Image (cartoon, grey):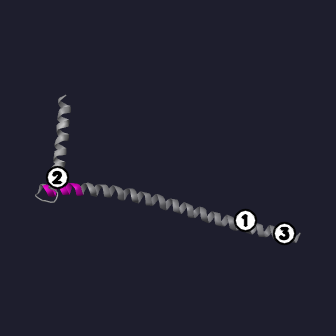
Amino acid sequence: MSVIAEIIDTLENKVEKLFIKMKSLEKNNQDLKSELINTASIIQTQSEEIQSLKSQYETLKIASSLLGSDDNKRDTKLKINSLIREIDYCIAQLSD
């Protein structure tokens, strides 16, 4: 009987260790999920900031071209032509 008791004690110890390890892994998993959510939020914020900076950069390029910079004159002319076409389209829509 003592052999069976030792086996049961050993088994109980192993099961207890498994539960402790499982709790530790669950906590680690929860921490990782929280970190993932925070990281996704940071990425979203940075993506929005990048888009804003790209828009500002394009605006500055156009403004620079309008002020006489030779670097982006072609791009500026194309953008102005595009804006004129959009305005003409809007006027045509209002006229109908």
Q: Are marks 1 and 2 in contact (CB under 8 Å)?
A: no
Residue 51 vs residue 12: left or right? left
Among numbered discs 3 and 2, the one appearing first in the sequence: 3
Which residue position is annotated with label 2? Answer: 76
Q: Which residue is mark 1?
A: 15
| Residue 64 highlighted magenta (yes or no) | yes
Circle 1: residue type: Val
Residue drawn at (61%, 65%), measured in percent from left and top?
24
The magenta segment is 57-65
Question: Disc 1 vs disc 2: which is toward the camera?
Answer: 2
Residue occupied by mark 3: 5
Instruction: Identify the amino acid type marked 2.
Output: Thr
Magenta span includes 93: no
> What main secondary structure does the magenta stretch of the protein show?
helix
Q: Nearer the viewer, mark 3 or mark 2?
A: 2
Label 1 crowding class (10 Å Cα cut-off): few <14, some 14-19, many 20+? Answer: few
